[in-house]
Amino acid sequence: MRTPPHEPVASDISEAASGRGHKASAPERRCILSGEVSPKDGLIRLAISPAKEDGISDVLPDPLARAPGRGAWLGVTRAELEDALAAGKLRGALARAFKGAKLTVPEDLPDLIETALSRLLLDRLGLEMRAGKLILGSDRIAEQARSGRVALLLHASDASEDGRKKLDQAWRVGRDAEGSGGRLEGRGTTLPLDRAALSVALGRDNVVHMALADDKSAERVQSVLTRLMHFLRAKQPLQNTGEVQSAPRSNDDLSIER
């Protein structure tokens, strides 16, 4: 079948992102709730399952954005999603996105999304470990950090403050950042995952701190981590705190559509 002239072909619920007559540098998508357009790498894709016997499909997160068929994109935080779910706005947005489909929207969709993104991060860390890119053990991390060979430093959510501070300081020394005033840039990222979750996922005992020396490996992990942190509403990755907390809301977060 021929495509009519000037008619875009797309499998997702989307609009032409730029609308300005030039090709965007990266694929962009529109958040079905906020209406904001941004690069799709920061968004969460929702897909629907095949219809059941009653003709109803389930709405599920598609963190890898690989599920077949049409998809809808979310660029909001968990708190904003929960508000939209409670007010019925999410159901209305999905009904408009998946026109004609009978949908079931899980009440625990925010939990499903957080779990999917956390799993994606853990899988990414596991891949980097198997590739020999992940550095474990406080002494080894400190040595590499002081030598300026750490690109990304990560802490479990229940890591001790003293342990975090020692490694953060070693990292700053290696990056010539000690005493420069760039305190946030010289701190590792506190993950929204505790040592038990990290240890089980990586198959190692007591994983509290991790580091990556390879820049490309660090970028791959950071890409997944940024999506999770944004969904949890941490504008800056959680730093040197003992608990995972939501940051205050603001208007300058990633919101993307596809």
Image (cartoon, rainbow, N blue to C red):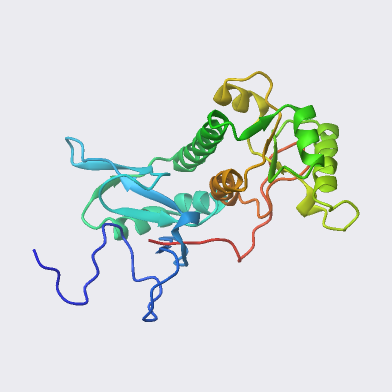
> Which residue sits at x=58%, y=52%?
230
Locate the C terminus by quadrant.
bottom left
> Which residue sits at x=62%, y=33%?
134
The residue lying toward the viewer, choosing from 209 and 242, is 209
> Which residue sits at x=21%, y=73%?
7
The residue lying toward the viewer, choosing from 139 and 230, is 139
* Image coordinates for residue 161, horizontal then vertical, percent: 83, 35
- From the viewer's perspective, tell me whether residue 170 is left or right of residue 1: right
Q: Residue furthest right?
A: 179
Locate the N terminus by quadrant.
bottom left
| Relative vertical location of residue 146 with respect to residue 219 in this rendering, above or below | above
* Image coordinates for residue 58, horizontal then vertical, percent: 31, 41
| Relative vertical location of residue 164 with respect to residue 196 in this rendering, above or below | below
The residue lying toward the viewer, choosing from 109 and 244, is 244
* Image coordinates for residue 44, horizontal then vertical, percent: 45, 51
* Image coordinates for residue 9, horizontal then vertical, percent: 23, 65
